[in-house]
Image: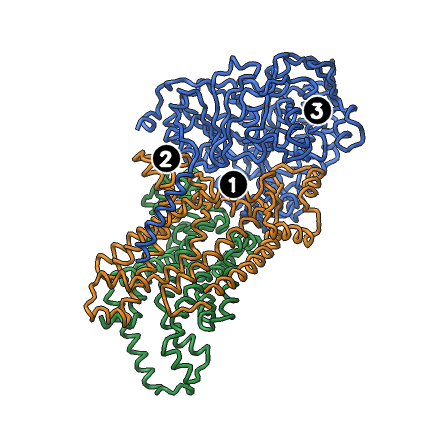
Amino acid sequence: MSAVSLPPTATLSRGRSLRQDAWARLRQNRLAMACGTVLIGIVLLCYVGPLFCSHTIEAQNLDQGATPPSAEHWFGTDEAGRDLLVRVLTGGQVSLNVGALATLVSLIIGVAYGATAGYLGGRADSVMMRVVDVLYSLPFMVFVILLTVAFGRSMMLLYLAIGAVEWLTMARIVRAGVQAQARQEFVEAARSLGLSDSRIIFRHIVPNVLGPVIVYTTLTVPAVMLLEAALSFLGLGVQPPQSSWGSLIDQGAKSMETYPWLLGIPAGFFSLTLFCFNFVGDGLRDAIDVKSGKD
Amino acid sequence: MLSIRLFPLLCAVLAAVGLTGCGSGTMDAKEGAERKILLVGNGADPRFMDLHLVNSVSEHHLMMALFEGLVAEDPVKDAEAEPGVAERWESNPDKSVWTFHLRHNARWSDGVPVTAEDFVWSWRRMLTAALAAEYSQMLFALKNGREFYEQKVSAEAVGAKALDAHTLEVTLVGPTPHFILMLLHTSWWPVPRHTIEKYGDPLDRVNPWSQEGHMVGNGAFQLKRQLFRQVLEVEKNPQYWDAANVKIEGIRFYPIDSDSTEERLFRKGMLHVTEIVPLDKIPAYRRDHPGIFKQDPNTAVYFYRINTERPALKDPRVRQALAYALDRESIVRNVTRAGQKPAGGLVPAMEGYAAADLFKFDPEKARGLLAAAGYPGGQGFPKFEILINTSEAHRAIAEVVQQMWQQHLGISIGILNQDFGVYLDSMSRIDYDIMRGGWNADYLDPATFIDMWTTGNGNNNTHWSNPEFDRLVAAATQEGDGAKRFALLHQAEELVLAEVPAIPIYFYTRSRLVHPAVKEWHPKLLDNHPWKHFELISPPPASSMDSFWNR
Amino acid sequence: MLRFILRRLFQSLLVLGVVFTATFFLIRLKPGDPFAGEKAMPASVRAQMEKRYGLDLPVWKQYFVHAASFARGDLLPSLRYEGMPNAKIIADSFPVSLVIGLSALTVALGVGLPAGIIAALRKNTWLDYSAMSLAMLGICLPTFVMGPVLQWIFALKLGWLNVAGWFERSDWILPSATMGLIYAAYIARLTRGGMLEVLNQDFIRTARAKGVPGRQIVLGHALRGGLLPVVAFLGPAFAGITTGSFIIEKIFQLPGLGQHFVGSVFNSDYTLVQATTVFYAALLVLINLGTDILQAWLNPRVRLT
């Protein structure tokens, strides 16, 4: 802090007002607020709800297989006669964890890597981006299968690893933004003030590319959750009897015309979550967009 | 601006590629019936078209259209075969030497006669190790077959002799009462020497003789075109000796690998016969369309292999306990749902061989056995896993089994899902606790289900071994009397079942949807329906599905 | 510019080499072998097969044999589909995926760009919300749900199209729509974000102040800069779009390339894994090169180095 020649008080007060501005703008965005509320509701439901369920995820009643929603089973039962409500809620925990963890990992790696490459430019940038090309090209399925062989029994490790693969696009997007910013006047100014590269990158440039980063982050959450679903389709997802939204949707899709609720209910939760994520993401993007307030 | 420029460009590219896009048009079941073309869902693309290399069910179905052996599949009966290239045959009293009289009008699709020499040459090709034919061991039934394969004797020593162009004498290793049924397997059928040699080295696995445009066969149909992942079409072979009695003009085999896509295609009226019926659709089809839904018994068994060297699972009493704690009735009624039979043994019922009926659901007895083995109420039982490969049905069964063992024995287990390749690797390395397995017959004989449990057999994969069992199986192969042979096999099966290296679960059925345009449909135990006997009715008779088809 | 392209092409060759090497060793780490089936293969047969395809050699030797072939442009024959050259497998299936991919891209741009632009121009109005909701449809459901739903509506209920298969021109429509709707969602969101970013910049304000008509501002000035994130996203995505999707090809029974990416790995078809991966990598580096050039054109501040 002390190395900065700007008056610290000015930075602080301005920072606070920015945040307040952003919050005020976000509050004006009714759809984003509504979606945020729904999202919090879903998260609470998934984590707290199962504590109040009288059924367990694995208790079967084979002769009561695939019954539609009823007073006893609010969401009906699946083909093995298991309560769908508790399976959807605990499955939601898995999917939400996956979305959050993998996205966080990809965000951290992607922003750091992309920003560095974009700022440094030249040879370093070339090398770093060719490394991204290589990682992009490697067959994803080989990774996934090797990871399932290695960590098949620990889903969280698996999805952390998936996050580590998902950062590539983020890196490209951040790099493109940073490249555009790196040659603007304020960067030159910061450099002439003798600020360190990392400080310039992360304090001055990255905040300016936050817009696309937030948009892409909120695209990564659905992407990762969809990926989890696709892996379930290939049989590489969670191990039974554990469920995830992806695995429930996969099983539901196989009998969508016969037992529609087995698809409809988990897919409804899944879609609603992704939908809300997207609008909250757009709202956040708009909120932190400094210039938009002056419109 | 960008989008405005990009759009016409994209459209232009699309139009250009579109001109070269697709193959020929589609044909629906009605048009197929009218033009006498059978439309069949056939599961998968063939990996091989060389008769000697094929090893899958879908390939077998294609070969049944393109080739014919000495004897041919009977359209109705399971334990008999009808004449094929051979008009008639006889054997010596102990059924170890067989003489086949070939019909004079049997011809390859290029008009060249099929002779006894063709069979002799084909069998030698099959038995040459360099070809690496997976089913070459089927021909070890021939005298000196194994020795020739191991290059210990010359080709002339192999027990197959052409006495003249139309007489074939076959000498077997020992008495083989079921030899005629063995001959229904592709490994015994002839390949055209003159065509194979024309296109290259007969021992070259990738010799192009079996490609579209080159292939010559002797079946009722010949290859018309093959489009990978789209269709394989065969047309009537005018050179076929019985062509006058072949009532359809051709068959289109569609390699559809998704059961739900196949069902939707059938519902749209695009198929005559499906490969399978999706699990969840079975009850509705059975109830609403009984004339369409076919559920035939199938000679195959579903079981769980046990690694008999794992702690706890080493004890036969534990394995028995696991077997008695399964309510198979409930599994077939609620999970598999296609009328499967609960399996009390490892060999499905066949003519003259009744299926064993052990392991009636008995939780009391199971708990007793487990307690006797030192795990009362499941206490102290080590944690283990059921290994399955990716499939809706395997997962559903494993979840139910998991629950039953938990409930009745108090032991908790996990389920480990691997993709097929990794799963096979785990199986061959015997790196599992308990794993799902299945076995179907290459030809109709109980021994095909029993041999696999002998010591060191490549399909045993359980570490289980029992010298008395091995002795009984060996004795059965030397027994010329059918009934005595079955008795020996029964004894052997009882031995396996007593020690339970594998827990039988159910005997398969085969469910299909069959369009009413198909004149007759007969259940066949091995699911091999001879295409030459199919007939199509045009216009198709009214059916319960008409509301879908006449949209 | 030319020097830049030449240097990038040279780098691309290096990338391909690294990708090939990594793939070669990674796929061999996976348990399983290309000849396995449910019934055990007799040991003598397996030995023959391994000898035939050089799998009995030490791995480093195999590596040099394979690397030499690939360097010559010979992608070797498949191990699983014996006798079928990998180059032919790719040549047969890639056009199908390309057709589906390009029409999917048309759907994606056709839905995504207008939705994103409208949403940006009418920020936080109901028009914004409904345009974005519409664009969002494609990523709210996994493809293995969207595909069957489209089949059910358009093939079975309405009877307009075939359920599956690759026989008629109309067989493009459902798979392209299924795939296009996913990317439409991404494009709409990135467009909206990018546009908003640019619309607030000084040069647009200046243009507005000068009285340049709104339409011209949007199409002539804002779109050019606003599309940057879309281009950065589409570059790498393009290779994925045009090389097919395993799930879509399975649902619609298509003879595309996507099935081979997944199938070859499942089957441990080593040579096919190598061939498809190197092909994909080549496509990807070329497209990325194109993307970088396009980005430089869209944003003069980016210099090609």
User: What residue is pinned by disc 3?
Assistant: B121
| Mark closer to the observer (1, 3) | 3
Circle 1 residue: B394
Residue type at mark 1: give it: His
- The location of residue B132, given as percent across then percent down, is 68, 35
Q: Image quarter for residue B181?
A: top right
> Hue of chain A?
green
> Toward the viewer: C250 or B491?
C250
Question: Looking at the image, which is closer to me, B20 or B162?
Answer: B20
Crowd rating for badge 1 (residues with CA inside 10 Å; few <14, some 14–19, many 20+)? some
What percent of the width, then of the height, locates residue C233? 40, 59
* Mark number displayed over residue C162: 2
Q: Which chain is orange?
A: C
Quadrant where the image shows the N terminus of chain A: bottom left
Disc 3 or disc 2, which is closer to the eye? 3
Residue under the point 71% across and 16% down: B168
